[in-house]
């Protein structure tokens, strides 16, 4: 999670993104004014289509290899653990694809606010 790697991943969009690195999950909770969040995981019982994501809601994703730590899935501020439907036998989707799928699903639920 070096600054150089994050900027490379952001490509031409780095100017429109504020990257904040938290030491751990507890540090994130202490410094972020969130009411609740959604965890996205292959372990989710709720399908993304059954979730209403509103402006201001947080989405939490884990690494492709390990997923989210258990504390992120079970914390009292975790509103739901949601999953993206996949073909039977699939392990998981690429992280960037998962983020894009859920993010655009959420944006669509909110009439693509800020997009033209």
Image (cartoon, rainbow, N blue to C red):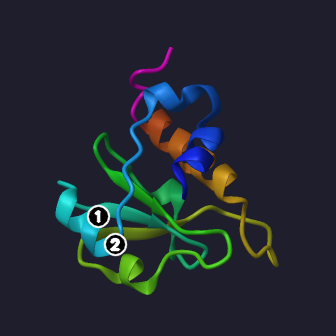
| Side of 94 relative to 48 (left or right) | right
Q: Position of residue 78 (x, y in %)?
A: 31, 70
Circle 1 crowding by C-alpha within 10 Å: few under 14, some 14–19, many from 20: some
Q: Which mark is residue 25?
A: 2
| Side of 10 relative to 22 (left or right) | right
The residue labelled by disc 1 is 28
When the figure is inspected, residue 58 is found, relative to residue 8, above or below; the finding is: below
Q: Position of residue 81 (x, y in %)?
A: 44, 71
Circle 2 crowding by C-alpha within 10 Å: few under 14, some 14–19, many from 20: few
Residue 8 in magenta? no
Give, as a single range, the part of the protein colored magenta.
110-116
Measured in 3D between alpha carbons, the distance from the residue under mark 2 to the one under mark 1, in whole angstroms, is 5 Å
Q: Position of residue 109 (x, y in %)?
A: 44, 38
Mark 1 residue element: helix
Q: Is residue 92 visible?
A: yes
Q: Are marks 2 and 1 in contact (CB under 8 Å)?
A: yes
Mark 2 residue element: helix
């Amino acid at each position: 999670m070096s600054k150089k790697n994050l900027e490379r991943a952001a490509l031409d969009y780095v100017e429109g993104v504020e990257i904040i690195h938290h030491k751990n999950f507890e540090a994130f909770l202490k410094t972020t004014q969130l009411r609740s969040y959604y965890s996205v995981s292959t372990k989710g019982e709720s399908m993304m289509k059954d979730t209403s994501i509103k402006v201001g809601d947080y989405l939490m994703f884990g690494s492709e290899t390990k997923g989210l730590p258990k504390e992120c899935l079970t914390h009292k501020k975790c509103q739901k653990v949601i999953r993206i439907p996949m073909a039977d036998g699939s392990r998981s989707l690429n992280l960037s694809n998962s983020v894009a799928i859920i993010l655009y699903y959420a944006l669509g639920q909110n009439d693509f606010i800020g997009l033209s």
